[in-house]
Image: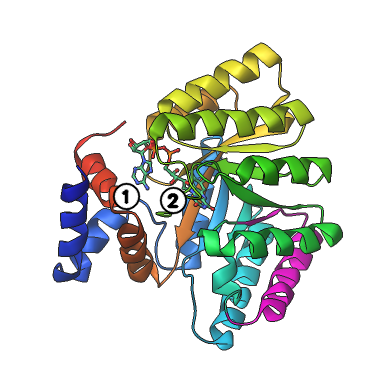
Amino acid sequence: MHWFNKMIVGMMPAFPKSFIWMFSRRYIAGKRLEDAVRKTKQLNATGSLATIDVLGEDITDLSEAAAAREEGLLVLEAIRSEALEANLSVKLTQLGLRLDKEACFQNVRTLAKKAAENNCFLRIDMEDSTCTDETLDLYRRIRREFPRSGTVIQAYLKRSEADVRRLIDDQIAHLRICKGIYDERPEIAYKEREEIRDEYKKLVGMMFDSGSYAGIATHDRKLVDWAVQTVRERNIPRENYEFQMLLGVTEKVRKALVRDGHRLRVYVPFGERWYGYCMRRMKENPRVAGLIIKNLFIRD
Ligand code: FDA
């Protein structure tokens, strides 16, 4: 199916924006903050938590980083004033990582400070492997000052077991574990589906062993079933983990997890830059385009 996915991605720019919006809107709360607030309220009403993400990444000017920081502050303010059961997820390249590391740190620090004042949690997303070291370094600095913060580890990276071990040893492992979305080189990343699943289980197992808080971010039915069974067999307290899923994906599984008493957080992206975000995601990983087309016809 690789050629099919690539073909779809190649054709995308030829379609009108309104057409792309038609099938992207399921995955995006909307263009404005009030859309994200409305979606989060709907999710909260059905027993789900949310993490809100202002769309955008890789900027070319520090003024854009400052604008992204201000948007993040508005989200934190909305979470407080609307009493949302939600936290904020941020991407470091959007906050200036590739332009000026110290400016990026200060932007994240401003957000982490505001989050702490509002008793809210801040999650630092993980981007491609050129950012891994810098993201973990920055997270360590932030975490020293703000305990209500966490980051993300990608199971497909061969380095991840060592990274999780170090974070656990340093008692700062508040981690979302995901498979990883970027197309990485085989020298540094596992490529086989089963291999990635095995790594995923190993990392979540390490989190459980150490009593660290694990965000189990996957829609893979086999991994979800494995995690549910492991939590039950090992008596992992509800306060030590949550499932996390993307808006618009595997809604039935989400509902079943909530019904069975698990904490479930939905990733709620919003913003004006939805088009660039969608196109980039699909170019980086044509498989996403295939999944979106598949999900137009099959509701799981
Ligand atoms: P898998 O890819 O096997 O998908 C299982 C099924 O889920 C598919 O068959 C399909 O039905 C559905 N599905 C999965 N992804 C879909 C999509 N995008 N659109 C439509 N359907 C989809 N990655 C990263 O590198 N850095 C990060 O910070 C994050 N953050 C993050 C947060 C949250 C809450 C989630 C759920 C995921 C991420 N990811 C991420 C993405 C993650 O790394 C991974 O690429 C996707 O979750 C897909 O992997 P699955 O484990 O779901 O399995």
- Give the image location of residue 228, x and y in percent: 56, 20
Q: Quadrant of ligand 1?
A: top left
> Is 138 within the magenta?
no
The colour scheme used to paint the residues is rainbow
Residue indicated by mark 2 = 181
- Give the image location of residue 78, x and y in percent: 62, 63
Mark 2 burial class by Cα count in 10 Å: few <14, some 14-19, many 20+: some
Magenta segment main secondary structure? helix
Q: Which residues are magenta?
A: 99-124
Marks 1 and 2, Cα distance to the nearest angstrom?
9 Å
Q: Secondary structure at mark 2?
A: loop
Mark 2 residue CB less than 8 A from any atom of ligand 1: yes
Pick the front one: 81 or 136: 136
Callout count: 2
Kindly identify which numbered label has been placed on residue 59: none
What is the three-letter code of the residue carrying label 2?
Ile
Q: Are marks 1 and 2 in contact (CB under 8 Å)?
A: yes
Q: Which residue is at 50% across, 60% downward?
A: 128
Left or right of 201: which side holds 298?
left
Pick the front one: 162 or 217: 162
- Give the image location of residue 138, x and y in percent: 72, 64
Quadrant position of the N terminus in the picture: top left
Pick the front one: 164 or 227: 164
Q: Quadrant of residue 161?
A: top right
* Farthest-out residue, front: 187
Mark 1 residue CB less than 8 A from any atom of ligand 1: yes
Residue indicated by mark 1 = 288
The answer to whether residue 60 of the structure is visible from this angle is yes
